[in-house]
Image (spheres, helix red, strand yellow):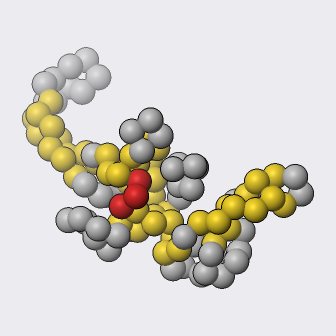
Amino acid sequence: MAAKIKKGDLVEVISGKDKGKRGKVLRVIPKESKVIVEGVNMIKRHQRPNPRMKEGGIIEKEGPIYANKVMLVCPSCGRRTRVGFKVVDGKKVRYCKKCGEIIDK
């Protein structure tokens, strides 16, 4: 995955049941090459009442999705894009392959 997608990025799903949906990355799991995206791949969990959650029942939450099924949305041009890397002022930064703008500020 090479850190092409980071926590807080806006991404768009490019395949599967949630194709076309956009959301913010809540968590990255590099060991499994998966990401958790806000509002995507919603799963239902049966939850028992516990001290933290007074009320049990069926709760819906986001499940992990493979990182290769999402593409980064460029903050400057607003389109989904591939990510490139270049060194600027001694720092490795990500940039948009479509418009050439630097993603990491």
- Horizontal side of 11 relative to 85 (left or right) equals left
Which quadrant of the structure image shows residue 22? bottom left
Q: How many marks?
A: 0
* Residue 34 appears anywhere in the view: yes
Q: What residue do we see at 76% from left, 62% from top? A: 86
Kindly tell me whether residue 103 is visible in this rendering.
no
Taking 83 as reference, is 61 above or below it? above
Q: Is residue 8 above or below residue 86?
A: above
Left or right position of 50 against 65: left
Residue in front for this viewpoint, 23 or 89: 89
Instruction: Provide residue 79's location: percent of width, then percent of height.
Output: 51, 79
Q: Nearer the viewer, residue 12 or 42?
A: 12
- Residue 93 occupies which quadrant of the picture? bottom right
Give the residue drawn at x 18%, y 47%: 43
Residue 34: % across, % down: 39, 46
Q: Residue at x 15, y 23 (%)?
A: 49
Q: Residue furthest top?
A: 51
Q: Nearer the viewer, residue 45 or 4?
A: 4
x, y percentage for residue 105? 74, 60
Q: Is 58 on the left-hand or right-hand side of 51?
A: left
Residue at horizontal 31 percent and vertical 58 percent from the top? 39
